[in-house]
Amino acid sequence: MTEKLLLLIPVEKDGALPKTAWETVSAVRALGQGLNAPFDVGLWGADVKHAARELASCGASRFLAVEGADFADARYATDSAAAEALARASQATVVIAPSNSRVARVLGGVSHRLQGRADNHATAVQVVDGRIQLTRWYYRQRIMVVLEREHRPWFIALESGAAAPWSGPSGDVALEPVGVSLTDADKRTRFEAIQQPPADQQTIRPDAELLFVAGAGWTKKQRDGQIHVEEADRIIREFLAKSGASLGGTKSIVDQAGEGGAVLSCMSHMNQVGQTGSTPRHPKGLATCCHGEEPHVVGWRFINERRAVNLDPNCGWAHGKADVLYVADAFEVMRKVNELLSS
């Protein structure tokens, strides 16, 4: 089968490309080389000219664009219309897009309109024996599946971390405008504003270099026989503010609020990492007062460097689940870390 690829990217409101887009460029380039197939770039947003210039040397055959104020904000009706128009104009058999909320919202609907098939959360896409193979995880990241599809067009949303970010010189490109007809009903949904907590209260930071995970040990009796939850909360908040790390928690600590136990004010179920929580992809991870149980550790599957601080030398982290285990008191360690970060 002769393949034709389309790299489909929504452009941010300020004209920039989303972070995952650069990784997706690398993946599509490698796929095109493996298949000896050309690829187009399809961009949509308020103004895509700057983004197109940044991708000028990526090796695309054509640059297709849907531009206009109506496509500035994320909205299902307009985003799906733009993505559909770009896919039709390209006549691609395989469409690959960076996996973010804007893409995930519309990819299934667009593939249905084009009688295609869609797969989200792909962690790798490669060519094996001349055929495209997609890798993704199921059952809370416990089962890895490699799949192929005969049906075309095939729409794929590629997760962050699937490839190294592409970089290349910018330049001038010939943009081919693609027309999209919108009705008043398509523009009925309006963007009002983004609401988010102040920076010092924001604890979930997907783009942070470090994931800091707190276990239930922070809220238990310490060496003096007393509970020091307020101090633990202060130490953790200070570290997050100074390091810019993202905060995670074990199931045992996030469940304590419902069980009437002492809780950290900065911790909620949204911070849970593990089999029944999130599976983040930070470059580094540091677990403190956490015993490294398997249901929790499964959430660290895509963390590249794992370290842990625990007083128990026989905890789960010591059994090959951490690159480095510091047998120490997390309170003392993190106080010293905060002191060093302040100097």
Image (tube, helix red, strand yellow):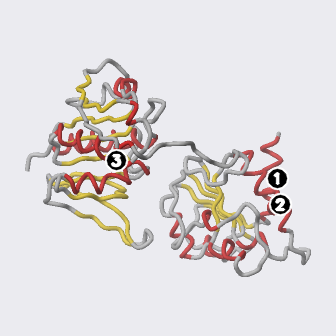
Q: How packed is label 1: few (under 14 Cα within 10 Å), some, or many (20 or more)?
A: few
Mark 2 residue element: helix
> Which image quadrant: the C terminus?
top right
Query: Is disc 1 in contact with disc 2, using a CB cutoff of under 8 Å?
Result: yes
Residue at which label 1 appears:
336
Residue type at mark 1 is: Lys
Q: Which mark is residue 332?
A: 2
Residue type at mark 2 is: Glu
Give the alpha-carbon distance from disc 3 to disc 1, as whole Å: 52 Å
The residue positioned 34% from the left and 62% from the top of the image is: 136
Mark 1 residue element: helix
- Name the foreground residue: 52 vs 297: 52
Query: Disc 3 vs disc 2: which is toward the camera?
Result: 3
Q: How packed is label 3: few (under 14 Cα within 10 Å), some, or many (20 or more)?
A: some
Give the alpha-carbon distance from disc 1 to disc 2, as whole Å: 6 Å
Furthest residue toward bottom: 259
The spot of residue 14 in percent (x, y) is 48, 30
The residue positioned 26% from the left and 24% from the top of the image is: 175
The spot of residue 95 in percent (x, y) is 24, 47
Q: How packed is label 2: few (under 14 Cα within 10 Å), some, or many (20 or more)?
A: few
Query: Disc 3 vs disc 1: which is toward the camera?
Result: 3
The residue positioned 33% from the left and 39% from the top of the image is: 25
- Name the foreground residue: 204 vs 107: 107
Number of numbered discs on residues: 3
Q: Is residue 146 left or right of residue 4?
A: right
The spot of residue 21 in percent (x, y) is 39, 40
Give the alpha-carbon distance from disc 3 to disc 2, as whole Å: 53 Å
Q: Which mark is residue 321?
A: none
Residue at which label 3 appears:
77
Query: Is disc 3 in contact with disc 1, using a CB cutoff of under 8 Å?
Result: no
Residue type at mark 3 is: Ala
